[in-house]
Image (tube, rainbow, N blue to C red):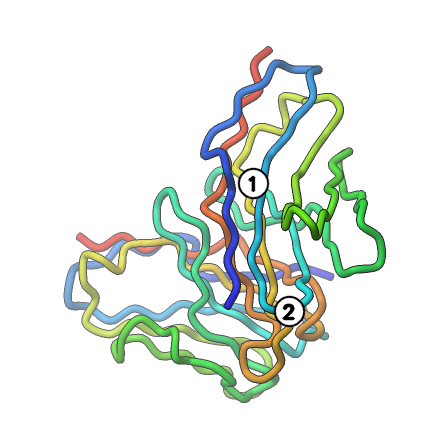
Amino acid sequence: AQSVTQLDSHVSVSEGTPVLLRCNYSSSYSPSLFWYVQHPNKGLQLLLKYTSAATLVKGINGFEAEFKKSETSFHLTKPSAHMSDAAEYFCVVSSNAGGTSYGKLTFGQGTILTVHP
Amino acid sequence: DTGVSQDPRHKITKRGQNVTFRCDPISEHNRLYWYRQTLGQGPEFLTYFQNEAQLEKSRLLSDRFSAERPKGSFSTLEIQRTEQGDSAMYLCASSFGPDQPQHFGDGTRLSIL
């Protein structure tokens, strides 16, 4: 079984300040982890993906995430927030268990990021 | 790469009616997934296909829900006898394989009157 917990439902930052969106995961197998972003009334866009090649993963738009197995965490960061970063962010784990569940995504509840001028 | 396309973008229907949504995946992707997203929640997995084979459908919400991918290309999701609780965003995604990132369409928003 696998699950994802996003520790903050809302995060508010000022433009130009750092962003930290927190995510803890639970998985019986070595997980594949993702962060997706969703703008209002739109589908989900992949920000970055972790698949065990490197613990620090760089994504699009200046975002990055660090996989910490000892803490079962996969937090998303960005050094300097931009107004266009305002959206909802989802931490996602993919089942690597094999069988018919292989590749199925389990989403966290989402974190809404607000960026103030 | 034209992206995943979903049609319609919005559907408003009366309770008890049947609705069908279409998803056109990225052309070379053999995997196609359906998810449901309700307000304030993350997407919830419903079912998926590898080519034309539906490999898991146990998460379809009831027997009123069914999905097809007859030729391994586009897929349809049908909801029969719609209920108020079916109001949600229905998302389709496709991927090149089980360990490849899923690319999402913009979704179909269903509203039940």
For numbered disc 1, what is the local secondary structure? strand
Question: Mark 2 — on which chain does it sit?
Answer: A
Above or below residue B73? Residue B111 is above
Q: In which quarter of the image is the C terminus of chain A?
A: top right
Q: On what subunit does the disc labeled 1 rest?
A: A
Q: What residue type is labelled 1?
A: Tyr
The part of the image, by quadrant, that contains residue A9 is: top left
Q: Image check: A98 left or right of B113?
A: right
Residue at figure coordinates x 74%, y 43% from the top left: A66
Q: Position of residue A74 (x, y in %)?
A: 66, 45
**Residue A45, position as x, y percentages in the image:** 63, 48
- Label 2 packing within 10 angstroms: few (<14), some (14-19), many (20+): few
The mark that comes first in sequence, 2 or 1, is 2
Task: Determine whether label 2 and label 1 are within 8 Å by CB.
Answer: no
Judge by depth and name the residue closer to the eye, B7 or A1: A1
Q: Name the residue under label 2.
A: A29
**Residue shown at 50% from the left, 58% from the top:** A3
| Label 2: element kind | loop
Q: Which mark is residue B7?
A: none
Residue A65 % position (x, y)? 73, 42
Q: Residue at x 50, y 68 (%)?
A: A1
- Horizontally, residue B32 falls left or right of residue B27, namely left
> Which three-letter amino acid code belongs to the residue tagged 2?
Tyr
Look at the picture and state if B86 lies above or below B73.
above
- Please identify the residue farthest to the front as the structure is shown: A70
In the rendering, at what x and y percent does residue A89 appear? Answer: 56, 40
Residue at 64% of width from left, 72% of height from top? A96
* Pick the front one: A33 or B15: A33
> What residue sits right under mark 1 in the picture?
A89
Asked if residue B51 is positioned above or below residue B39 in the image, the reply reads below
**Quarter of the image where one finds residue B65:** bottom left
